[in-house]
Image: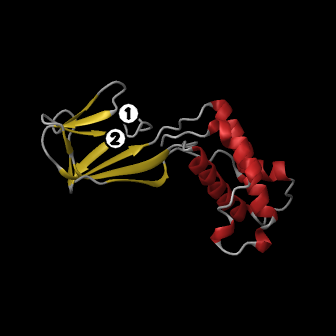
Amino acid sequence: MEIYQERQTGLASGATEIMDAAAVKSWAAIDTDLDDTVITSIIVAAREMVENFISKDLVSKNRELFVDELEYDGETYIISLPYNAKTGTIVVTSGTTTLTLNTNYEIIGIGGRYIKFTGNHKNVKVVYESDPVASASEVELAKSAVKVLIEQVYDNRANLEGDSDIVVMDGNTKKMLAPLKSIYM
């Protein structure tokens, strides 16, 4: 039996949000510095909502992929890497042991999309940095949607009742993002 579990563990080192509080304040005509912390947290939430809706990373993130038992094809043990894993950022462990490239495993396939192991390993964790897969024009469209979401949340912040109100994306924003929507992640 194999279990794949992937999770995000934060932005990759050197990665920044797709916009900062100053850009949002300029666009939304917010004059005060009192809410910069609130605006910054809304930027993160809005970007994550957009990424979840379009199934694409807009900024590079640290991610982990866990496999409890490797797939055996009758000859070798192999797993598929996520399509957005940056080459050169991959660290593979089995339990508490860090595996060594070209000794315990090798990266194979077109574009290095698979890990082939030299033996059966249990509780394999692949830590990697994701590569943003959106083009410059897609990022600009996504930024527009993020701005709309930020303004909606900021303007209605007094009426929010916990996190449940923040996860709602209106139909117009979804239509704006529809061309970016992908089935892969």
Q: Are marks 1 and 2 in contact (CB under 8 Å)?
A: yes
Q: Quadrant of residue 155?
A: bottom right
Answer left or right for 155 relative to 108.
Answer: right
20 relative to 3 in the view: left or right = right
165 vs 173: above or below: below
Left of 147 or right of it: where is 113? left
Nearest the viewer among 53 and 93 is 53
In the picture, measured across the screen, residue 74 lies left or right of residue 22, that is left
Residue 22 seen anywhere in this rendered image of the structure: no
Q: Which residue is mark 1?
A: 87
User: For residue 90, which numbered disc appears in the image?
Assistant: 2
User: Which quadrant of the figure contains the N terminus?
Assistant: bottom left
Residue in the image at 67% along x and 64% along y: 166
Q: Secondary structure at mark 2?
A: loop
Residue 114 location in percent, x, y? 30, 34
- Three-letter code, disc 2: Ile
Q: Amino acid at mark 1?
A: Thr
Q: Where on the picture, by quarter, is residue 177?
A: top right
Q: Residue 175, percent across and down?
A: 72, 44
Counting from the top left corner in percent of width and height, residue 133 is at: 53, 35
Q: Secondary structure at mark 1?
A: loop
Query: Residue, x 74% and y 43% (percent of image)?
Result: 144
Residue 132, percent across and down? 53, 38
Q: Residue at x 45, y 53 (%)?
A: 8
